[in-house]
Structures are given as structure tokens and as C-alpha cells.
Amino acid sequence: MINPHIHVPYNLLENYFPFIKKEKLNLEIYFGSKRFDDLKKKDIINLKKRLDYNPQLTIHAPFMDLSPGAVDSRVREVTFQRFSEILDFADILKPKIVVFHSGYDKWKYDSRVDIWLEESLKTWIPLNRKASALGVKIAIENIVEDEPANLKLLMEMVDSKNFGICFDTGHFNLFSKLFLSDWLEMLKLYIIELHLHDNAKDKDLHLAIGEGNFDFRTLFRELQGKNCVYTIEAHSVEDVKKSIERLKVYFK
């Protein structure tokens, strides 16, 4: 039986703690950019103490305004600093995986994957070295990619078992120009986490599994037996509950 993680922003944890602890949920904690500098080491230590039912954890790193493949070295330096600080949090919380956004947008880079890749490696190779020393894996999430070639290239160039893909179903459904089978053919080897949410190919609504038209049955069949983290990214408690129940149907 799949025991999924539930994506919750750090600043909303307090609102949901009674539900989280009652259900003993595994968590993916998202540390957003807006209040990031307000967080201190003692806050993360206190969070670890409050999670006394010993859940499995993953972390979602900040992404707003950040660019791991930035051509501007100063922008990349700030991004690296933020990401490194997240790994310092990981050293306390001991998550299995930290999820980062790829930062690739074909319009911003004029489809020059080579430029993005060259600069990205300056970010990911040292960060992966740090994560590996902490016993934490890095997963790169697809966002606005309409095909997966850039992600496959990144995986090949970093070439580390500690460095993989977080495949996001909602983002695929919204942006991809290729079939799901094409993505899985290229990326299946590297997938270590799934972000599970749904839409009708119109907006990134983060609906419950089955509320849109993503082909979850094919995804789960193709990844059967693969060791990866299943993370529900629905944006309401009701949709989280629906998703948990619908996952049970797929994996009964």
C-alpha cells in the first residue's frame, strides 16, 4: 500500500497540525521565499520536535525569482545561497528528498538548452555533493517544460544516483506537447518522486486525483514496482482526502 506524503507550506502547518498529527501524515514541507529570512535554526529544530510521531519527510525548496541556470552569475549566486540554506534545514529535518524547480523556460532561454545546462551544472553539482554528504537526495521538478529533453540532459550530465526527477502530473498535463509515454521513456529511469494533482489542461488548479483528465492509471502502471515517493499536491483538505482514497483504489 502506498503511504503518500502531503504537500503543506511551512506557513500553513500551524493551521493543519491537528489534522496532520491525528492522521499521522507523511509530509512534504514547502519553504516559500517570502518569509524565508525570518526562519532561524531554532524554528526548524522546534518543527522537528513537534513532528514527534516520526513521519517520513520531503522538502520543497523556494523557487520564486530564483534561477539555478541563470546566465547572470549574481542571480545564480543568490539562488545557490537559498538552495544551500534549504539543505541546512534538511540536515535538521532529515528528509528523504529535497525538490527543486528546474528553472528552464524555453522562451526565456530562446530554446538554448545548452546555455541553461552549462550554467545549471554550476549550481547542481556542488549542491548535490552537499546533499549526498547529508544523506539527502535532490529531485528536479518539471514546471513549464513542454518536453523532457532538457531534464534528461541534466540527469545525464550530473550522473548521480543521488540526483533524480520529481515528475509533476499537473504540470505535465498543462504544458506538455508530447504523450505521457514519451516522458516516461526518457525519464522513468530517473524518477524518484511524483507530485500528484490534476487539472483539465486549462489552469494549474492542483485538484484532487481524478478531478481532471490526467491519465493516472497509465502512470501508476508504468511505474509499478519503482521505488519513489508519492506526494499529493492538492490545495485543499477535502481534495487531499479524496486523493488519498483514490490512491487506495489504484494500489489495492
Image: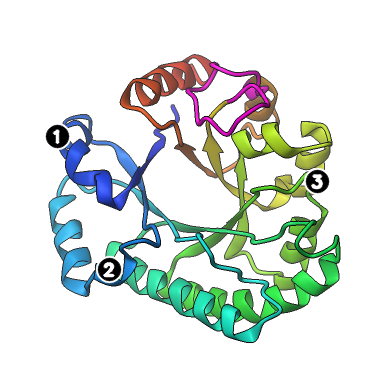
User: Mark 2 = which residue?
Assistant: 92
Q: Is residue 208 above or below residue 49?
A: above
User: Mark 1 = which residue?
Assistant: 18
Residues rendered magenta in the picture: 199-216
The answer to the question of whether label 1 and label 2 lie on touching residues, with beta carbons closer than 8 A, is: no
User: Mark 3 = which residue?
Assistant: 147
Q: Nearer the viewer, mark 1 or mark 2?
A: 1
Q: Is residue 46 magenta?
A: no
Residue at 64 percent across and 61 percent down: it is: 103
- The part of the image, by quadrant, that contains residue 199 is top right
Identity, as a three-letter code, of the amino acid under mark 2: Ile
Q: How is the image coloured?
A: rainbow
Mark 1–mark 2 Cα distance, whole angstroms, equals 23 Å
Q: Secondary structure at mark 1?
A: helix
| Residues packed near mark 3 inside 10 Å, few (<14), some (14 to 19) or many (20 plus) | some
The x and y percentages for residue 109 are 79, 65
Mark 3–mark 1 Cα distance, whole angstroms, equals 40 Å
